[in-house]
Image: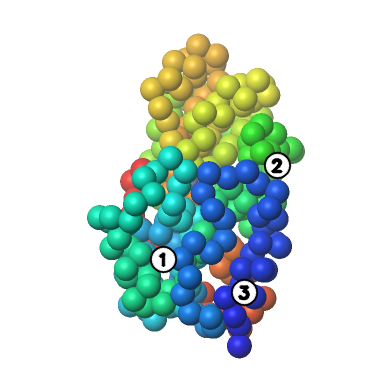
Amino acid sequence: MTTRRDILDWCDHTLQTRLFQDYAPNGLQVEGCDEVAKIITAVTASRAAIDYAAGQGADMLLVHHGMFWKNEPITITGWKKQRIATLLQHQINLAGYHLPLDAHPELGNNACLAKRMGWQTDYACGEQNLLHIGRPDQVETLSYWAGELMQKLGRAPVVVGDEAMQIKKIAWCTGGAQGFFQTAIDEGVDAFVTGEISEAQYHLANETGVAFISAGHHATERYGVRALGQALAQAFDVSVHFFDEQNPA
Ligand SMILES: [Zn+2]
């Protein structure tokens, strides 16, 4: 018998949750049943993920993007009411791990993206060490890596830069980390890969010669929570299944 407490303690300890300053609560966000036998993992605690977990009779929905973000209204209305109502009705525990799950050296989104792409991490830096700096396992052009990202993440990236340039040193941070581009430029990389792009990064890339690749927020963050789920399935007598969505953003 595995309890909610067992799962949460293991996640908090493994991900070292307390070391992070986050803008969403890490760990339990909505309390459900005490015993956990079936876990659904998903990138986001969307209505679709919650409905899927309910349909599967899951005891826990474990996500990277939970609810209750800082600066959001604190009232429980509309879509948020619907999500919470379904969780409570089906006694599903909602647990979310945000920055700790980006940063973990094996299970984290950044580590999983690197493994998938064949990039070696040399060091992490920037805000809360979330920016990873490293080298691809082979020196190839920007257009080669754009193709690899397309193939390995299943989504066409937005690429700003000289397609023929050779990428020797690369920086990456999954999700909405376009704000880290300047830090990546300061580290002297050839290219920076993240999930999203804003208007300013186009000009920065053109003016500095450092390539910018937006490979999808969802697409770059699918792998951390999946790895966390697999690790939980090994550590406990629980069944874990990953629910995916076709989110183009
Ligand atoms: Zn994210």
From the viewer's side, name the closer residue of 229 and 190: 229
Residue 127: quarter of image: top right
**Residue 140: which disc?**
none
Q: Position of residue 3 (x, y in %)?
A: 59, 80
Are the residues at dot 3 and dot 1 in contact (C-beta closer than 8 Å)? no
Q: Secondary structure beneath disc 1?
A: loop
Q: Which residue occupies 52% across, 59% down?
A: 96
Label 2, on which residue? 121
From the viewer's side, name the closer residue of 123 and 15: 15
Which corner quadrant holds the C terminus?
A: top left
Q: Along the horizontal axis of the image, is 15 left or right of 46? A: right
Amino acid type, residue under disc 3 in the picture: Arg
Label 3, on which residue? 5
Q: Secondary structure beneath disc 2?
A: strand
The label nearer to you, 1 versus 2, is 1
Q: From what the image shows, is residue 15 above or below residue 176?
A: below
Q: Give the Cα separation between the discs numbered 3 and 1.
A: 23 Å
Query: Can see residue 141?
Result: no
Name, please, the residue furthest toward the top.
Answer: 207
Amino acid type, residue under disc 2 in the picture: Thr
Label 1, on which residue? 243
Question: Of the residues under marks 3 and 2, which one precedes in the sequence?
Answer: 3
CA neighbours of label 2 inside 10 A, class few (<14), some (14 to 19), many (20+): some
